[in-house]
Image (tube, rainbow, N blue to C red):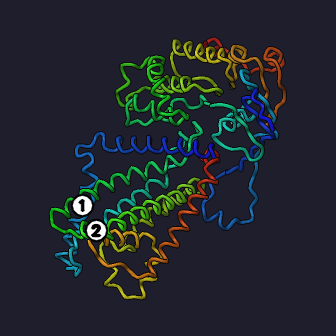
Amino acid sequence: MKKFRDYFLKSWGLTMEMTRNEIKARYKNAFFGFLWAFLNPLIQMMVIGFIFQYIIKTSISNYFSFLFIGLLVWNFFSYSLTKVTPSIVYSRDLIHKANFPREAIPLSIIFSNFFNFLIALFLFLIFLLITQQFFIFNNFLSLPFLFLSLLWIISLTSGLSLLCTTLNVKYRDINFFIQALVILWFYATPIIYSLNILPKWSLVFYALNPIVYPLEMLRFSLLGISFPSIVVFYGNITITLILIISGFFIFKKENKTFCDWL
Amino acid sequence: MEKNNDLAIEIINVSKKYILHHQKPTLIENIFKLGQKEEEFWALKNINLEIKKGESYGIIGENGSGKTTLLKIISGITSPTSGEVKLNGRIVSLIDVNSGFNPELTGEENIFLNGMLLGMSKKEINKQFNKIIKFSGLKSFIDTPFYTYSLGMKMRLGFSIAIFSNPDILLVDEILGAGDKKFLEKSSKAIQDFFKQRKTLIFISHLPQLISKFCEKTIILEKGEIKDIGKTKKIIKSYNFPNFGQLENLVI
């Protein structure tokens, strides 16, 4: 038990140190610094928002906020996944050098991205206050849902990323596969459109996309937009759990011999 | 069962199998294994070894005899296919001392990163911080970004961190290619001082001078097996070292 505790503390300490370094290194030479975490989805939102508000004319109310939350979640998820997947292979030098907790490499990337995600979310909350959209501040269900959706998003991202980065050590195709998949996945997720306008039968497919429910949960907690059906929940939670458990165990099993494949 | 506290390293029946890839397998090939057999290569076969605290061992052997694999297994960088390694105390290997740094960060920030990779806690690093900088001789560069460092500077900092991480067991592989003569002398002395503290040293080298300077006992590895083991003087006499000519005069 003590051994496990020592390992956990060591692993956590290293992960946090690497997370801090990742955050520092990313913005050290950038003029706008942390603002990029917010500027990036903001610019995307303005361009996509303009198209759907004025050219294609969507019927979704409060479309810009709706879209912004979608982009925020998607940017965190897709950026983490594409960056973590080749991370073990890119850290070849480190892995040959010392016996440190390997999970610090993927997790520090995810945590530093999550930090950016939280900053952008915080700025968005200020925006909601200024524009007097008080749903999250008045509704007692909002905070627990906000917390749960963030927990869901980060665990899902971690599980899937651990799985992909482990597989990528042996099969380098995974990296290319993920790059291609992420582009399609964007359209398979209700980011620029809403599930409400879709026929009921199509929800079965969204039940297979585990990022849908936590995204909708976040939208609910911030804007009070309705939840998708329970089918989506059951499907999403099952797939999320499978990904987390398999990612964790495959990483745990393989990480001792990463060195032999790099 | 009582634990033998005298032992620093206990290697029990360790074997390591590598699967030879003539080309990297793709996922598709692996799913539809087209009946082909994997080619195996045993880098280590049934190694048994007990090293007591305060002993120093040299390991010699031809290229491909399993020296580096043994070092990697002892240090936990990879795990054996079968068998077990028991360690008593912190172990640090001087392999790739110039890696494990982030080029975007300063030397100072990199000391923390590198030290933690080697298993130090933040508190320990803070304690050793000034000694590390002093030993590396990089005081005036310590707050500049790491990408401005030369290879020699990286190596000096890496070595300093490793030696001040206060290991109980030190593993050294083919010492220190870069670095000027002065630093080589300094690091050689650091390793000797280290050894005076009754700590354990394992040293891989092709150079008999270095082995006899640092190690009481020597192991000869051949094709993944221990061929001979004994007092360094005796072993070195029996072993036919490759001739390095001028190189021998170069090092320390």
Q: Give the spatial CA distance, label 2 vs label 1.
A: 8 Å
Q: Amino acid at mark 2?
A: Leu
The reply, left or right, for residue A22 in relation to residue B72 is left
The reply, left or right, for residue B239 in relation to residue A102 is right
- In this view, the residue in front, A231 or B170, is A231
Mark 1 neighbour class, 10 Å CA radius: few under 14, some 14 to 19, many 20 or more: some
Q: Amino acid at mark 1?
A: Leu
Q: Which residue is mark 2?
A: A222
Q: State the quadrant of the N terminus of chain B.
A: top right
Quadrant of res B56: top right
Q: Residue at x 61, y 30 (%)?
A: B92
**Residue A167: mark:** none
Quadrant of res A127: bottom left
- In this view, the residue in front, A77 or A20, is A20
Q: Residue at x 38, y 35 (%)?
A: B105
Chain to which the residue tagged by mark 1 belongs: A
Chain to which the residue tagged by mark 2 belongs: A
- In this view, the residue in front, A191 or A225, is A225
Quadrant of res B126: top left
Q: Position of residue B108 (x, y in %)?
A: 40, 28
User: In the rendered image of this protein, does residue B71 appear above or below residue A18?
Assistant: above
What element does badge 1 sit on? helix
Q: Pointers 2 and 1 in contact (CB under 8 A)? A: yes
Mark 2 neighbour class, 10 Å CA radius: few under 14, some 14 to 19, many 20 or more: many
Q: Position of residue B162 (x, y in %)?
A: 55, 27
Q: Are marks 2 and 1 on the same chain?
A: yes
Q: Which residue is mark 1?
A: A125
Q: Residue at x 61, y 58 (%)?
A: A250
Give the mark nearest the N terminus, 2 or 1.
1
Q: Position of residue A139 (x, y in %)?
A: 27, 71
